[in-house]
Image (cartoon, helix red, strand yellow):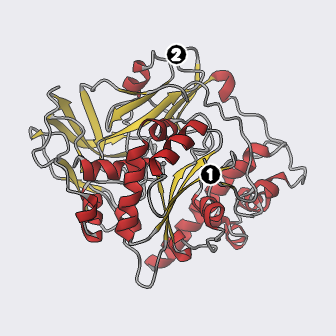
Amino acid sequence: MNIRTLSFKGGAHPPHSKEATEKSAIIKAKSPNVVVIPMQQHIGAPCEPIVKIGDEVKVGQKIGEPKGFVSSPIHSSISGKVMAVEPRLYSGGTKVNCVVIENDMKDTRLDTIIPKGNLQDLSSEQIKEIIKEAGIVGMGGATFPTHVKLALPPGKKVDTVILNGAECEPYLTSDHRLMLENPEAVVFGLKALMKALNVNKGFIGIETNKPDALEAVYNAAKNEEGIEVVALKTKYPQGAEKQLINACTGREVPSGGLPADVGVVVNNVGTAAAVADAIMIGMPLVQRIVTVTGKGIKNPKNLLVKIGTSFREVINECGGFSENVGKVIAGGPMMGIAQFSIDIPVIKGTSGILVLTEDDAKLPEPSNCIRCGKCVTVCPINLMPLHISNYSLLDKFDQAEEVNAMDCIECGSCSFVCPAKRPLVDSIRVAKREILAKRKKAQSK
């Protein structure tokens, strides 16, 4: 294989911890008796439920209608009867409106779920509409509606699409297994995204710790004009948008800017595969691959899970907890969100369920900053995390904004390398929330 190896400046090297599931083939999870499907599974406005108690629904049927441009429709992942439409707990830590459906175990599909035609015969606008109606969002965890990414603002032009196959987050292997087991779908999805944007250049970036996935995707794409598979040095956060763009193209997204400002659109490989399903099968986004792993899980697995299945059922399918649980995280250890309940549903952005033991979950006691500068060295955005954190801890949020707190991507590299174990990323998150709240208040006046 003739593959270039690329990277970016900065970053950290946390342990990969992927051994438990990197060789585990994707298994279709059992269909749950009940699904709880939140109307908020994406960045932007929540959906409005369009079904009511007692309604019979089918697989792929739209049950949530978007109520804003930055939003994405929600579909049923099973066939059955609507039991409730009410607020339920979800992984964000709050309650959101959910549609609760009892499974009839018939898996009856909606009649309109059919292939959408040959890619070469579809126009750019038709592809965008298929993606929009399929409810596809960023599958790497950010859950930004994909059709919104493809709707470029006036005056913006892009010439490149990049697929993120880095999967730099420790423990997670769902993207790895997808690229290894179904590379054709990833490549097809990239071709569709390129056609939707009328661009001729596409990259698929994969970290070097996944040589089998690199080979599989390279072989699937080697005869495709304009598509280049590149190897990325194994380094965290190699999969962050700005770092991926810099590694693949050498371009730098400006402070406060978007990838489109430098002519690029970035999507996850899982998003591309979902686009392929929407076009080739006609199936909207109703299931996803979830890595269930950690020392607290008896039998770590990569499972294909229906949206709305509870964490509890997914964990039980992996044999349950292996010992005293210290923490359950939706996502990975660096950017995931710790949960206080496992009676929450898998959503479109649930890339992993990580179960840490009590020993693994113990937080070290922080001490005073020793001014070593390691957080500055590893910051992929070239920020001064120690200063932003100090301002935040002193409630000086205006000063935190002045030193570019809002540019932080919350990757956690600074906290990982800090020898004093300072709560850097946590305090920076607080600062960002306060800054955003101040901006909203100013806009409302």
Nearer the observer: mark 1 or 2; the answer is: 1
Q: What residue type is labelled 2?
A: Lys
Q: Nearer the viewer, residue 431 or 260?
A: 260
Residue 374, above or below 81: below
Q: Nearer the viewer, residue 116 or 322?
A: 116
Q: Is mark 1 on a helix, strand or loop?
A: loop
Q: Where is residue 321 in the image (x, y as percent from the top left)?
A: 51, 17
Task: Give the labeled residue for mark 2.
Answer: 298
Residue name at image x 44 percent, y 85 percent:
155
Q: Residue 38 appears in which quarter of the rendering?
A: top left
| Disc 1/disc 2 C-alpha distance (Å) | 40 Å
Residue name at image x 49 percent, y 73 percent:
159
Q: In this view, does 19 lie to the left or right of 392?
A: left
Residue 212 visible in image: yes
Task: Give the labeled residue for mark 1.
Answer: 2
Q: Nearer the viewer, residue 441 or 177?
A: 177
Q: Position of residue 52 (x, y in %)?
A: 13, 45
Q: In this view, does 425 lie to the left or right of 200?
A: right
